[in-house]
Image (cartoon, rainbow, N blue to C red):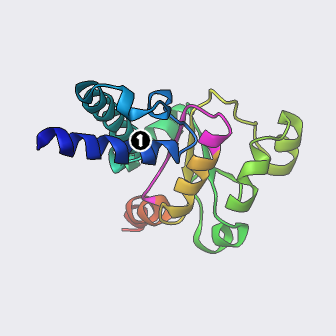
Amino acid sequence: MAVRECLKLTRIVCRVLSSRSYVATACTRELSAVPLRTQCKCALSRATRRAHLLRSFSSTAQAQHSVSHEQLKQLLSSRSAVVIDVREPWELREYGNIPGSVNVPLGQVHQALQMSAEEFREKYGSDMPSQNNLIVFSCLAGVRSKTALDTAISLGYSNVHHYPGGWEEWAKREVLQTKN
């Protein structure tokens, strides 16, 4: 009974894997030519790899790319990160901005991160971050900054983070504290 269930699982896993772009070569062979015990081990190891791949997109992995309010303050004071605010310019004029941040609207992030250093400086008034520089994306509440983070990662930037609290948290902690 357990062998049959394992065989069913093996075939299902192989079908799923073969429908993906990273087809496992072991699944392309004829299953009947492989002993059942080997099929079970093969399927379980592939399922484990698939689970590991899915875990890399989980909230735990996303938390590794997040910075807290205190961390952002330290990064800004030490000038060890480029903070890019991906809100629209009118939002910065209306609500305010994090001091020291560079405004690159979300719709321009993909293009901006591929510009030459001179073009970036001319358009955004700041030095172009390299692919190894620490970059922190910020927005109003953390949604657009996460999108910008994903864009930067897809372009090969390796040391990127986002501030999920965004301007809302920054204003609550910084602006309102100074007014009291």
Residue 159 lies in magenta, yes or no? yes
Q: Position of residue 15 (x, y in %)?
A: 44, 47
Residue nearest the viewer, comparing 82 with 96: 82
What residue type is disc 1 on? Cys
Residue at left offset 83%, top offset 34%:
117
The residue closer to the viewer here, 150 or 139, is: 150
Q: In this view of the protein, which residue sits in the foreground, 15 or 176?
A: 15
| Vertical position of residue 146 compared to residue 21: above or below | below
> Can I make out residue 100 in this image?
no
Q: Residue at x 12, y 41 (%)?
A: 2
Residues shaded magenta: 152-165
Question: What residue does disc 1 label?
Answer: 14
Q: Which of the two residues, 30 or 111, is positioned nearer the viewer here? A: 30
Residue 56, how many percent across, how many down? 40, 40
Which secondary structure lies at badge 1?
helix
Magenta stretch encompasses residue 21: no
